[in-house]
Image: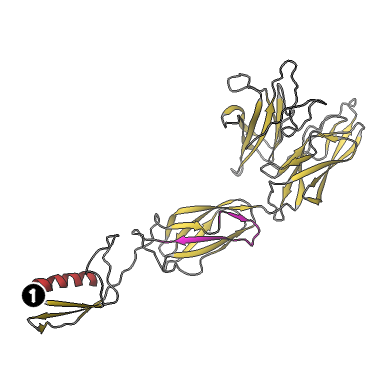
């Protein structure tokens, strides 16, 4: 039986035995044995001293001293919390830390002090500093997380001393650093016909100093030798995966063609593509590069288009693939592919029609590629936009090159289209 309950019962017995006794209470505020808002009887502090008199005579063994100590229960997996103190986005530089607070409470909301806690984190290249001390008087302990891998990481906490896992969790997003280099990702060392576009776009990827793909770079393509050209704009922004690509048209003479790709923000970062141009009368077939090294969704060609366009993509490994089209409202309008494909470069054609075979109106549409690798189950996705132009009699069949990769006819004035992602 707890001391507090024993004290309450003793007082009740004394009142019943000596109803006319005069009671004196010292060093105490508030009534005895009163439950708080949580329904818990809490002992007064400091200790309670009680004396009693009956008809002017003290009752032995007065004075009585009562001491009670309140303790919290085990940490509650539902009421305890894990939060990020310094925001949800952290640079993946191995130095910047996500400061994680673990706050333990029991089932009644009381802080659970003196508990040993630890965190677990998903993802790669993590550097974890576990809490160095048990939870404090507020039930709080802190951990730190650093990383060099740009990705979203799920963080969970466990109470080691109680073998208890918290139900709460949080997501921390580590982001890439500024770009430091550019690499060739595909389309290099092809063979094509003079004055023709190569079968595959040339593809580069932008990385930071830790190898993370940077999705905020711009790459300038420059013809170095062979007299060819780049279709559309020669400066191309990276997509959501840090990948840029361009359609390369070879020069008018057979022989070696060279194309440089450099970062706008870092001129010293440069790579060079080569291609062999052959005379169109020789019948030499195009010879794309072997297996791609990077998952890539290319810009459709032609773009804008009417009535048909080709969408190309690269798979470094065999994968279950879905290629879908959406309008600007997010409504799915067509599934072009839904099958398992081997590693390599692949193409899909779209004729500007929906699921029911009905022609769609002119406008801007999304095409989304999702792939799940067969060997690892890793999921990849990329999104691009395209423009469908239904030409009317006497109308101009071009569109602002800010949307596509190809210029319209000379002198053609296209309406400016704005796009909000």
Find residue 222 and report its horizontal and vertical position in percent. Answer: 84, 41
Q: Is residue 315 left or right of residue 155?
A: right
Q: Residue furthest left?
A: 55
Residue position marked by numbered label 1 in the rendering: 20
Q: How is the image coloured?
A: secondary structure
Find residue 148 and report its horizontal and vertical position in percent. Answer: 65, 57
For this rendering, which residue is in front, 317 or 52? Answer: 52
Residue drawn at 49 percent across, 62 percent down: 118
Q: Secondary structure at mark 1?
A: loop
Q: How many marks?
A: 1
Give residue 166's quadrant in the image: bottom left
Task: Check disc 1: other Cα within 10 Å, few if <14, some if 14-19, many if 20+.
Answer: few
Image height check: is 358 above or below 303?
A: above
Residue 1 shows up from this direction = no
Position of the C terminus by quadrant: top right
Position of the N terminus by quadrant: bottom left
For this rendering, which residue is in front, 348 or 239? Answer: 239
For this rendering, which residue is in front, 60 or 107? Answer: 60
Q: Is residue 60 left or right of residue 44?
A: left
Residue drawn at 80 percent across, 40 percent down: 188
Image height check: is 79 above or below 338?
A: below
* Residue 95 drawn in magenta: yes
Residue drawn at 90 percent across, 37 percent down: 226
For this rendering, which residue is in front, 186 or 232? Answer: 232
Residue 300 shows up from this direction = yes
Give residue 32's quadrant in the image: bottom left
Find residue 139 and report its horizontal and vertical position in percent. Answer: 42, 65
Magenta extent: 87-104
* Residue 246 drawn in magenta: no
Image height check: is 96 above or below 349?
A: below
Q: Is residue 302 left or right of residue 338?
A: right
Find residue 161 and report its horizontal and vertical position in percent. Answer: 42, 65
């Amino acid at each position: 039986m707890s001391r507090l309950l024993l004290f309450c019962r003793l007082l009740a017995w004394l009142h019943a035995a000596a109803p006319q006794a005069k009671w004196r209470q010292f060093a105490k505020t508030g009534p005895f044995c009163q439950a708080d808002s949580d329904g818990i009887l809490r002992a007064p502090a400091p200790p309670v001293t009680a004396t009693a008199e009956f008809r002017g005579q003290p009752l032995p063994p007065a004075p009585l001293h009562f001491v009670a100590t309140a303790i919290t229960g085990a940490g509650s997996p539902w009421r305890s919390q894990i939060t990020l103190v310094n925001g949800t986005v952290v640079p993946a530089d191995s130095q910047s830390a996500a400061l994680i607070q673990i706050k333990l409470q029991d089932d009644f909301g009381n802080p659970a002090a003196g508990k040993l806690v630890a965190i677990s984190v998903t993802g790669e290249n993590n550097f974890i500093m576990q809490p160095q001390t048990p939870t404090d008087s507020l039930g709080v302990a802190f951990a730190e997380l650093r990383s060099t891998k740009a990705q979203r990481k799920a963080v969970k906490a466990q109470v080691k001393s109680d073998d208890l896992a918290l139900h709460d969790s949080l997501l921390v997003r580590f982001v890439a650093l500024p770009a430091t280099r550019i690499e060739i990702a595909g389309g290099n060392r092809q063979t094509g016909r003079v004055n023709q576009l190569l079968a595959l776009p040339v593809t580069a990827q932008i990385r930071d100093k830790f190898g993370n793909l940077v999705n905020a770079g711009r790459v300038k393509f420059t013809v170095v030798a062979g007299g060819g050209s780049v279709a559309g704009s020669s400066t191309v922004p990276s997509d959501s995966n840090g990948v840029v690509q361009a359609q390369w048209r070879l020069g008018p003479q057979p022989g070696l063609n060279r194309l440089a790709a450099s970062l706008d923000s870092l001129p010293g970062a440069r790579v060079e593509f080569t291609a062999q141009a052959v005379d169109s009368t020789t019948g030499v077939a195009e010879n794309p590069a072997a297996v791609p090294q990077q998952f890539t969704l290319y810009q459709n060609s032609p773009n804008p288009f009417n009535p048909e366009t080709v969408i190309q993509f690269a798979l470094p490994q065999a994968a279950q693939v879905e290629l879908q089209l959406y309008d600007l409202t997010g409504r799915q309008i067509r599934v072009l592919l839904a099958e398992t494909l081997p590693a390599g470069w692949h193409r899909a054609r779209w004729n500007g029609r929906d699921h029911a075979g009905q022609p769609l109106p002119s406008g801007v549409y999304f095409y989304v590629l999702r792939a799940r690798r067969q060997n690892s189950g890793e999921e990849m996705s990329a999104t691009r936009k395209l423009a469908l132009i239904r030409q009317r009699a006497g109308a101009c069949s071009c569109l602002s090159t800010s949307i596509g990769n190809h210029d319209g006819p000379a002198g053609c004035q296209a309406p400016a289209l704005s796009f909000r992602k």
